[in-house]
């Protein structure tokens, strides 16, 4: 369960106060795929950074399974983010000189799990997102955009996170491939019992979401 209460983020720009996120409150149950939708400049990226503990809010709380990440110290927050939050990016952000399977193994490097077990788990995740075994050892440059995004999703799930955040996950994909990726995220939220939130400007993605939050000028409308 993700519970956001009265979340705000302010900063100064050219001597003026800018309210990027304004008193945002919402809840997303575990196992649900949700979408935050809004135009460019609506505050989506800032909100995503706050939810992912990549930035600190000016005020408000963000509770994941009743733990308020806003109150965590820096050291605990780094560990929490590494273990409990998964990220999927528009540009995939795969390590170019690592194979698909090694990209998925990477987040598990410091978990105390043996190398053989990490590889076994990574292979299982790749299969679950639709990557065939003959592509496990291919580097990102030898994979299509859709395949790279599937690998990125598998990597996000590597440490069994409680929350997965996807930033414009279909932005670099054609519409047909994008639809497949969104349906995959929806399926994984349910089967992995995790909360998955996609941030997008694309109305078409919202059709697959159980919850839709519209963001405009930093506020939910």
Image (cartoon, rainbow, N blue to C red):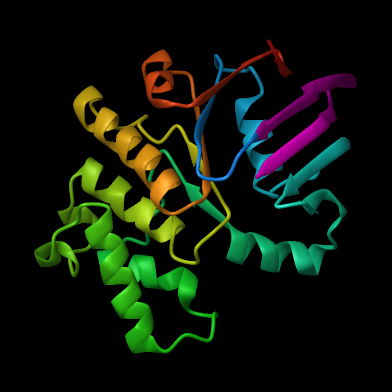
- Say whether residue 175 is left or right of residue 85: left
Residue 98 is at least partly visible in this image:
no
- Residue shown at 88% from the left, 21% from the top: 17
Image quadrant of residue 23? top right
Q: Looking at this rendering, what residue extends furthest in the left direction?
A: 134
Q: Is residue 201 magenta?
A: no
Which secondary structure is most common in the magenta stretch? Answer: strand
Q: Could you tell me residue 57's position as x and y percent?
A: 82, 39
Q: Depth check: give the residue in front, 202 or 18.
A: 202
Q: Depth check: give the residue in front, 210 or 173.
A: 210
118 over 26 or under it: above or below? below
Image quadrant of residue 122? bottom left
- Residue shown at 48% from the left, 79% from the top: 109
Q: Could you tell me residue 113's position as x and y percent?
A: 47, 85
Q: Could you tell me residue 171's position as x and y percent?
A: 37, 29
State the extent of the magenta-drawn residues as a range: 1-27
Residue 27 is at least partly visible in this image:
yes
- Residue shown at 73% from the left, 39% from the top: 3
130 over 179 or under it: above or below? below
Q: Could you tell me residue 183's position as x and y percent?
A: 31, 34
Q: Is residue 13 magenta?
A: yes
Q: Depth check: give the residue in front, 152 or 204.
A: 204
102 over 160 or under it: above or below? below
Which quarter shows the N terminus?
Answer: top right
- Say whether residue 84 is left or right of residue 152: right
């Amino acid at each position: 369960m993700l519970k956001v209460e009265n979340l705000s983020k302010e900063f100064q720009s050219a001597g003026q106060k800018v309210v990027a996120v304004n008193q945002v409150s919402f809840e997303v149950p575990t196992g649900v795929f949700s979408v935050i939708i809004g135009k460019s400049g609506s505050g989506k990226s800032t909100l995503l950074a706050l939810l992912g503990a990549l930035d600190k809010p000016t005020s408000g709380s963000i509770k994941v399974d009743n733990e308020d990440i806003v109150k965590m110290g820096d050291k605990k927050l780094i560990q929490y983010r590494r273990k409990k939050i998964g990220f999927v990016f528009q540009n995939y952000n795969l390590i170019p000189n690592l194979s698909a399977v090694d990209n998925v193994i990477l987040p598990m490097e410091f978990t105390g799990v043996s190398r053989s077990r990490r590889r076994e788990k990574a292979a299982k995740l790749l299969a679950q997102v639709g990557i065939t075994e003959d592509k496990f050892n291919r580097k990102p440059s030898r994979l299509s955009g859709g395949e790279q995004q599937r690998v990125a999703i598998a990597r996000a799930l590597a440490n069994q996170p409680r929350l997965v955040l996807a930033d414009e996950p279909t932005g670099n994909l054609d519409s047909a491939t994008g639809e497949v990726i969104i349906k995959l995220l929806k399926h994984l939220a349910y089967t992995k019992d995790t909360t998955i939130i996609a941030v997008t400007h694309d109305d078409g993605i919202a059709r697959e979401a159980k919850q839709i939050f519209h963001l405009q000028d930093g506020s939910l409308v």
